[in-house]
Image (tube, grey):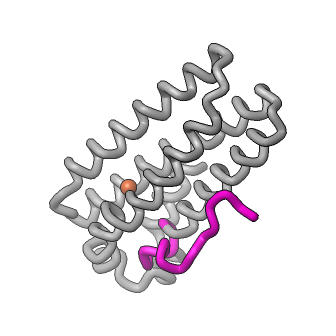
Amino acid sequence: MAFIQWSKDLDIGINVIDTQHRRIVDYINELDVVNKGGDITDINRVLDELVDYTVTHFAFEEDLQESAGYPFIKAHRRVHEVFTKRVLDFQNRAKAGDNIAPELLSMLKVWLINHIKGDDVDYAEVVKKSLGNQETAEKSGWLGSKLKRFFG
Ligand SMILES: [Fe+2]
């Protein structure tokens, strides 16, 4: 049983974002697996991947919000910043040899689900409107090049 089970109510209705959120959940689930394995090198590796991917996702999300003219982007960015700082603290403790994975996992689960269902749902409408037809947006120029710019 996965640590976080994806459920429909975590979809915010923007394909590119939902895909990224699922990927973050995958990383968290992987962190749970390596935590059970107890190998500190594995834990640090997955933690680094999770942090890398999540920070890129945040930047992408903020960029979409900016393009769409989402009015609460500042507050949203701040929420991302505070969270990133918290996770970096965990990462530093982990690098110093602390076993932070269990504590981090429960924090991540609560935070991510609340963030998606609250803060992310809040911007969904405005961004969806600005994307227009999502399939066209993904295939045509700018969304594709945005994705490339952030995720390579
Ligand atoms: Fe967000």
- Residue 89 drawn at (x, y percent): 48, 25
Is 93 positioned to the left or the right of 74 in the image? Answer: right
- Left or right, 79 with respect to 2, comes to left
Compared to residue 33, the image places residue 117 above or below, namely below
Q: How many marks?
A: 0
- Residue at the limit of the structure toward the top, as seen here: 96
Query: Residue at (42%, 74%) from the top-left corner?
Result: 12
| 60 to 125, vertically: above or below | above
Residue under the image location 57 percent in, 50 percent down: 151
Residue plotted at (28% across, 61% down): 67
Q: Is residue 139 left or right of residue 46?
A: left
Taking the image in four quarters, ligand 1 sits in the one at: bottom left
17 vs 90, nearest the viewer:
90
Q: Quadrant of residue 85?
A: top left
Residue 45 locus on image (x, y percent): 72, 33
| In magenta segment, residue 125 | no
The secondary structure that dominates the magenta segment is loop
Viewer-nearest residue: 147 or 113: 113
Give the residue at x 20% y 48%: 74
Q: What segment is highlighted magenta in the picture? A: 1-17
Is the residue 32 above or below the residue 43 in the image? below
Residue that extends furthest to the left in the rendered view of this protein: 71
For the residue pair 2 and 67, the one nearer the viewer reads as: 2
Q: Position of residue 65 (x, y in %)?
A: 29, 60
- Image quarter of the N terminus: bottom right
Q: Name the image quarter holding residue 122.
A: bottom left
